[in-house]
Image (tube, rainbow, N blue to C red):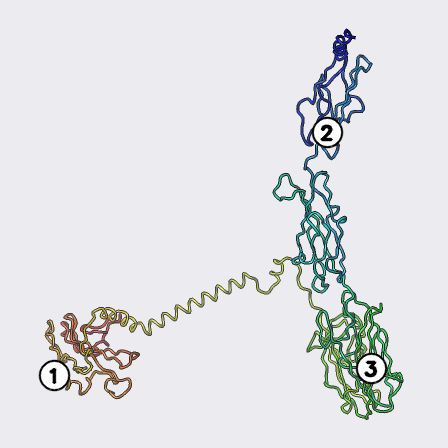
Amino acid sequence: MGAWALLLPLLVATARAQVCAVSNNIFEVQENTIQSGPLVHIDVPAGQQVTLGSSSTPFAFRIQGTELFLNVTPDYEENTLLEAHLECKSGNTVVTQLRVIVFVLDVNDNPPKFPFELRVEDVPEDSKVNTTVIPETELEAQDPDKDDVLFYTLQEVTPGAGSFFSLLGTNLPALRLDRPLDFYKWQSMSLLLLVRDTQEENAQPSHTATATLVLDVRPADLRPPWFLPCAYSDLYVCINAEYQGAVPTGHRLPAPLVLRPGPIYAVDGDRGVNQRVLYSIVTGQDDGTFAIDADSGNLTMTRSVPSPKTFTLLVKGEQSDGARYSVTWVTIEARSATGSVPQFLQSRYYGTVVRNSAVGVEVRDAASPSLPLRVWAQDPDFPDLNSAITYRITNNTDFRMDGEIVRTAARLTQEGVSYAEVEAMNTVTAGTARSVLEIQVLEPQEPAPTGPAESQAEDRRFSAVDMAALGGVLGALLLLALIALVILGHRQFGGRLKCCSGKALDHQALAFDNQAFSDPHEANWAPALRASPGPTRAGPPEPPEPAPREASGSAAAGPAPGAPEAARDGGSPAAVRSILTKERRPDEGGYKAVWFGEDIGAEADVVVLNAPAPNAARAPDSGSEHSGDGDDEDGEPGGGSTYV
């Protein structure tokens, strides 16, 4: 036994040397990974060859020499396991068989996908809040990556739609109703369903998919029929109209009764449902005097009423499916009829109709084109007896009467004016009245242009270029008018403006000390020195001596000859007092005196007191106080003049 123990390793080694072998036969490779090197080395005995068996994964492996290579880029979604069967042969005899297995590991490399791109779902208007509108199984997306967890969000496409619907959970994409629906306000809403295979938006790798949900609100039968015209109505409620009429006693009227405010007419309060309404009389007549048409609601007489009486009928309007109904009152008054002749409210009625209109088209009222032309006659002694009056057109086959409404009876092919006589007859008294219809047949209006905006602009009478040119011309004319006004103003007031804006501003800076103004009790006027008329000797003038204060009393006794009238009127509210300057400039001849009003707002008057100037010999009478009139053309003051 001990000898065999020593020979066993030698025998095993000898046996291994006679068969193929690999160091490892199980591998793990992430999908999308490219293996550039060999997967495993194969030990092949001398005299043998190794090949891939037919049971290997097709095209997945190759053998180069004694190296096993991965021949494809693994894709978990195609194959989760790759298998290579190795056969070692000696000639045609298979000596050894080996199996090498490659497990492909999944990675997040595929986006999720919804089973639809657009899903349209009808949602009943009366669905309860918290109802599941679309279950999870119909909205969930599929992700080929087995380990991915999907996260869902809902985004509104229609503004406000997000307040009506939500998802049950982030990972539970069932659609839930969160608030009551209103067909009249929200008839269709769109939402965007988004799915992501990572919880964080910025995670890498991360994949998303979207699908659109359109929720169409299906109107529910929530409201009963409404009798029109409603006394009050909104989108949800109507206060039903009540109808009134009158019939003559002793007569059975063959036509449907004419009621006010209109014929008995009801519509389904749910416009989206719009069930047909059937009419019936519930109570109000015991003898069956009146009958109502179940489909039209027209009320007719089945027999005459022998004596005056008032009928109050309760009329029901019920949906054809019997789900809902409403009722209203119809009051019919039976009165004694007289033999008066009916009278039209107008002697002539004016209407319009489009040329080539089909037969049966309403003629429109010329004064109110949105309304049909309606003629109306009444018995003056029985104004409510409209049911007894019938209308017909007597002399024109192009038109006919439908109650009080005028309709076309033939296709009108000629443009122009058509006249017709309409006759009203009281079927009770046989009295008739006639009026005239004047109907204008008009050409159809051309449809509004639907081409590009440029084509429409060219069709206009005035283009934008024309309007811009007109604006430029008007602007130039306005500029010329302003220039003309400036020139006229300069010619009219130029001298005054230059005088006041030139010399006056210069002399304001001299700041004369008018001492007479500081003491109102002193004399406020002294006569100005005047130059004698005639020639004088040239030379600098001698400065005159100021008037003494003691003599101010006599000087104030009367105004100076050149003082303004306001100064003379000492008793007036606007009396002014003069101030005589105590200084004079050597380069100007004369004194300056200024009158100020007692109130601050009075204007100042300036009197120029002149003294003989050096050039007085050349300018006779230049020292007068009116020497300012001798200014040159430029408006400059003459020599010796002083302005304030």
Query: Badge 2 is on which residue?
Result: 103
Give the residue at mark 3.
Answer: 313
Q: Tell me which numbered mark, 1 or 2, is placed earlier along the sequence.
A: 2
401 or 85, which lies in front?
85
Tag 2 secondary structure:
strand
Q: Which secondary structure lies at badge 1? A: loop
User: Which label lies toward us, 1 or 3?
Assistant: 3
Q: Position of residue 593 (x, y in %)?
A: 20, 78
Q: In terms of sequence position, does the residue under pointer 2 or pointer 3 come before the other?
A: 2
If you read the primary sequence from the N terminus, does the residue marked by circle 1 or circle 3 appear first? 3
Rendered location of residue 584, percent (x, y): 16, 73
Q: CA distance from mark 1 to mark 2?
A: 136 Å
Q: Residue tagged by mark 1?
A: 550
The amino acid type, in three-letter code, at marker 1 is Glu
Real-space Cα distance between discs 1 and 3?
Answer: 117 Å
In this rendering, the answer to whether 83 lies above or below 9 is below
For the question of whether residue 47 can be seen, the reply is no
> Dot 1, crowdedness within 10 Å: few (<14), some or many (≥20)?
few
Kindly indicate whether the residue at mark 3 contacts the one at mark 1 (C-beta within 8 angstroms).
Answer: no
Callouts 2 and 3 close, C-beta under 8 Å: no
Q: Amino acid at mark 3?
A: Leu
**Residue located at (82% from left, 92% from top):** 336
Q: Position of residue 353 (x, y in %)?
A: 74, 73
Q: Quadrant of residue 19?
A: top right
